[in-house]
Image (spheres, rainbow, N blue to C red):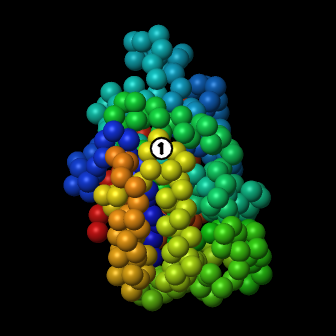
Amino acid sequence: MKSAFLLSLAAAALAATPAQWRSQSVYFLLTDRFARTDNSTTAECDTSVRQYCGGTWRGIINQVDGIRSFLLDQDLREQLDYIQGMGFTAIWITPVTAQLEQYSPFGQAYHGYWQQDIYALNSNYGTEADLKALADALHDRGMYLMVDVVANHMGYNGAPDSVDYSVFSPFNSQKYFHSPCFIQNYEDQAQVEACWLGDNSVPLPDLDTTQTDVQDYWYDWIESLVLNYTSKTPSSSSILQAHIEQSTASALIPQSTSRRNSGTASTTQLASTALAKSSMATQNTPARTKITSTACSTTRSTTRF
């Protein structure tokens, strides 16, 4: 089934099996809507215009103050104290990759699902040091970090028949994608696997994940993400479960097994789970709200296959 990956970056001292991951309590947050670096809990954000509201990776770590601290009966309290204090053991953040930069008919890519360059971070959320600091802060608490990975598509502002594929990295050629067509029937598995999300204004070119080159790009990128943002190398006992096209699954899993068997031993866990194509990749219209440190407190569970 065509889907987005979820990449779990576990604390280096807490290698986890899939069974252990299933026992975690995961707090999902939309990075741009959770907390600003400056700790502001009153900055107004008109989400009806679908633009960035200033949430950052550093904001997830920062201490909270003002009215929120008063309500918590503490002078200063870290955001992670707040999350961990509710009993959560892992945080799931939205995609970290560089996004479509233009303001599209459906707003900006604040949500993280219109990526264009998987090798660059979304600078609106912060720097490499900020993301590493978040991973380290969670590791120090014995908590886990889960990063949403969109392996299904890229994002483009313009007509589907005139996509400039050169703007995508590393998938900079039409050869990596399915031919343009939009899904009309979600009960039709062939359409779901081969056609595109989005529409004629903001199409989401659909990657052909049956291709070995596409799979290799993703495996290499996921491994580099873990190496860059954890203090250990990928574990030889790590589990990478990729579910893209149903017909491709049998090819993906053996490949991941051979890769991890050739890796060096450590206690870092690399795991991914799959989600079906979801409405998060399309253009939703959220209500007008203010960005606060509790702006997104929705919990989600991951799906294991």
Secondary structure at numbered mark 1: loop
| Residue at x-position 40% and y-position 55% | 264
**Frontmost residue, 268 versus 153:** 268
Amino acid type, label 1: Thr
Q: Is residue 99 visible?
A: yes
Place residue 158 in its image quadrant: bottom right
Left or right of 54, for residue 28: left
Left or right of 158, for residue 186: left
- On screen, 178 above or below 237? below
| Residue at x-position 56% and y-position 76% | 214
Residue beneath disc 1: 230
Place residue 37 in its image quadrant: top right
**Frontmost residue, 132 versus 188:** 132
- On screen, 100 above or below 91? below
Q: Which x, y percent locates residue 87?
A: 28, 33
Left or right of 6, for residue 50: right
| Residue at x-position 63% and y-position 88% | 179
Q: Which x, y percent locates residue 203?
A: 66, 73
Q: Which x, y percent locates residue 171?
A: 66, 73
- Quarter of the figure with the C terminus: bottom left
